[in-house]
Image (cartoon, grey):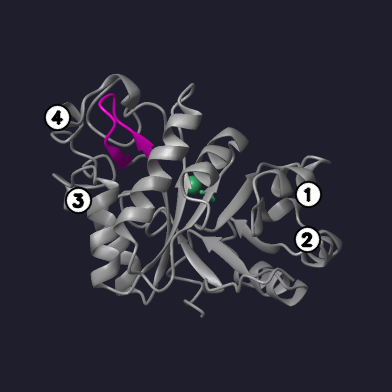
């Protein structure tokens, strides 16, 4: 195993609280906390004017009352959007949070972060560097730093170059590419972060044998999660925060 210890829990909430609250909002993270979760994955990208904020998609269409691309909007425009009403009336008026706001909430409430660097198309390196620098600055005193992850090798290289000491995980889609190990090593990742459906016990062992921890997304079935932990998977990212109890 790597000499860097794995400090993250066995369960991590996906996008705050999965699908139980509007994803990537403070309301979602609070909901996860109300169910006992003390770790969450979030998706972070940049506004046109370089503010880091939580949003999964390139566009705001699906998860807000606005339309258009995040990368074309200033923070002033994004800050006035409603990112909650699409999910349900109870969340009307919930704003898009800045990454800075979320870090402050998580520090105050003892919540660990898995920060997925989710660059708008074409802004991979810029986003990786900006998110890493902001994490380094705002989490300087945090005993456990956010785990930075990304599907983008370019974002992870930029993150490493900007803040080498922050832990990184390389995300991969299903199917896992044949060169996953080389790509993890190319960004000095401490972990493989795979779609859970693509994992086998052998892949988990290969990762561990090569000094990598293993995280996976997005497993919403308790029996499947138990199997993954039995194989040695270190963290399971889940939407099912009401079904799979938080585990350290
Ligand atoms: O970080 C794990 C998971 O969130 C990756 O997929 O599309 O839900 O961001 P996605
Ligand atoms: Mg994500």
Front one among 203 and 212: 212
Distance CA(mark 4)–CA(mark 3): 21 Å
Assess disc 2: are there few (<14), some (14-19) or many (≥20) residues with their C-alpha within 10 Å of its C-alpha: many
Label 1, secondary structure: give it.
Answer: helix
Assess disc 3: are there few (<14), some (14-19) or many (≥20) residues with their C-alpha within 10 Å of its C-alpha: some
- Would you say 98 lies left or right of 24 here? left
- List the residue tagged with mark 3: 91
- List the residue tagged with mark 1: 181
Query: Which numbered disc covers residue 76?
Result: 4
From this view, report whether residue 38 is shown above or below residue 77. Answer: below
- List the residue tagged with mark 2: 207
Distance CA(mark 2)–CA(mark 3): 41 Å
Mark closest to the chain's N terminus, 4 or 1: 4
- Which corner quadrant holds the N terminus? bottom right
Query: Which numbered disc covers residue 28?
Result: none
Residue at screen point 53% across, 52% down: 164
- Would you say 97 lies left or right of 157 here? left
Indicate the position of residue 159 as horizontal and vertical percent values.
Answer: 50, 43
Mark closest to the chain's N terminus, 2 or 3: 3
Front one among 144 and 151: 144
Assess disc 4: are there few (<14), some (14-19) or many (≥20) residues with their C-alpha within 10 Å of its C-alpha: few
Indicate the position of residue 140 as horizontal and vertical percent values.
Answer: 34, 63
Distance CA(mark 4)–CA(mark 1): 41 Å
Q: Are marks 2 and 4 in contact (CB under 8 Å)?
A: no
The range drawn in magenta is 44-53
Front one among 190 and 116: 190
Quarter of the image holding residue 130? Answer: top left
Q: Are marks 2 and 3 in contact (CB under 8 Å)?
A: no
Mark closest to the chain's N terminus, 3 or 1: 3
- Would you say 7 lies left or right of 62 here? right
């Amino acid at each position: 195993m790597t000499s860097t210890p794995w400090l993250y829990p066995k369960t991590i909430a996906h996008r705050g609280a999965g699908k139980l609250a509007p994803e990537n909002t403070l309301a979602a993270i609070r909901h996860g906390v109300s169910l006992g979760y003390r770790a969450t994955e979030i998706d972070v990208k940049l506004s046109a004017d370089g503010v880091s904020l939580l949003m999964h998609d390139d566009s705001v269409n699906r998860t807000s009352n606005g339309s258009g691309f995040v990368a074309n909007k200033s923070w002033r425009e994004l800050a006035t959007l409603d990112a909650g009403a699409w999910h349900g009336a109870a969340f009307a008026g919930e704003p898009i949070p800045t990454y800075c706001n979320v870090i402050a909430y998580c520090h105050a409430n003892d919540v660990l972060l898995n920060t997925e660097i989710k660059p708008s198309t074409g802004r991979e390196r810029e986003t990786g560097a900006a998110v890493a620098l902001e994490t380094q600055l705002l989490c300087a005193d945090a005993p456990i730093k956010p785990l930075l992850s990304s599907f983008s090798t370019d974002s992870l290289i930029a993150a490493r170059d900007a803040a080498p000491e922050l832990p990184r995980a390389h995300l991969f889609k299903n199917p896992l590419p044949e060169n996953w190990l080389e790509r993890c090593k190319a960004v000095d990742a401490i972990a493989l972060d795979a779609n859970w459906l693509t994992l086998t016990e052998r892949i988990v062992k290969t990762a561990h044998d090569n000094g990598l921890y293993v995280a996976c997304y997005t497993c919403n079935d308790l029996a499947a999660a138990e199997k993954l932990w039995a194989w040695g998977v270190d963290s399971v990212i889940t939407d099912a925060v009401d079904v799979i109890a938080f585990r350290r």
